[in-house]
Image (cartoon, rainbow, N blue to C red):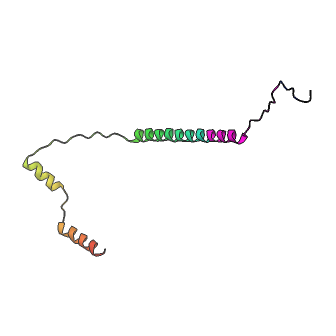
Amino acid sequence: MDSPSPSMPNFNPQPRGGNESHTGRIITVVIVIILLAVGGVYYWMLQQEAVVLEVIPTVQVQPEQATDSTTSIDVDIDATKDIDLDAEFKDIDADLKTL
């Protein structure tokens, strides 16, 4: 019984070309890790977007009554800041000369 009988095939538990099956397993593991990483990043981005959307408050603006009367226009003009255009242009010229 020490030698295998001619009717029984020789059974070898290790597959031929063991490196090929090992390489296939490594490739499968790498693909699974990449898919998990991509899914995790996608989930994280969705959570970040949801947080940003929750943080932004909504502001309701009441429209002002539009009046075209001369007095309301004069009040608006007086309420605006007087701009000294000559001084502004002098500042711009001075800035341009330093370039």
Residue at figure coordinates x 38%, y 42% from the top left: 56
Residue at figure coordinates x 40%, y 39% from the top left: 53
Q: Quadrant of the N terminus?
A: top right
Residue 18 pos. (x, y %): 72, 40
Residue 84 pos. (x, y %): 18, 66
Q: Quadrant of residue 15?
A: top right
Residue nearer the viewer, 34 or 15: 15
Point out the residue furthest to the top here: 7
Residue nearer the viewer, 58 or 74: 58
Q: Is residue 35 above or below residue 76?
A: above
Q: Is residue 48 above or below residue 91?
A: above
Q: Is residue 57 left or right of residue 41?
A: left
Q: Is residue 8 left or right of residue 61?
A: right
Q: In this view, does 37 lie to the left or right of 3?
A: left
Point out the residue furthest to the left here: 70
Which region is colored magenta?
8-29
Point out the residue furthest to the right here: 1
13 is within the stretch colored magenta:
yes
Residue 68 pos. (x, y %): 9, 46
Residue 90 pos. (x, y %): 22, 72
Q: Is residue 95 left or right of residue 10?
A: left
Residue at figure coordinates x 26%, y 74% from the top left: 94
Q: In this view, does 8 lie above or below 90?
A: above
76 is within the stretch colored magenta:
no
Residue at figure coordinates x 62%, y 38% from the top left: 28
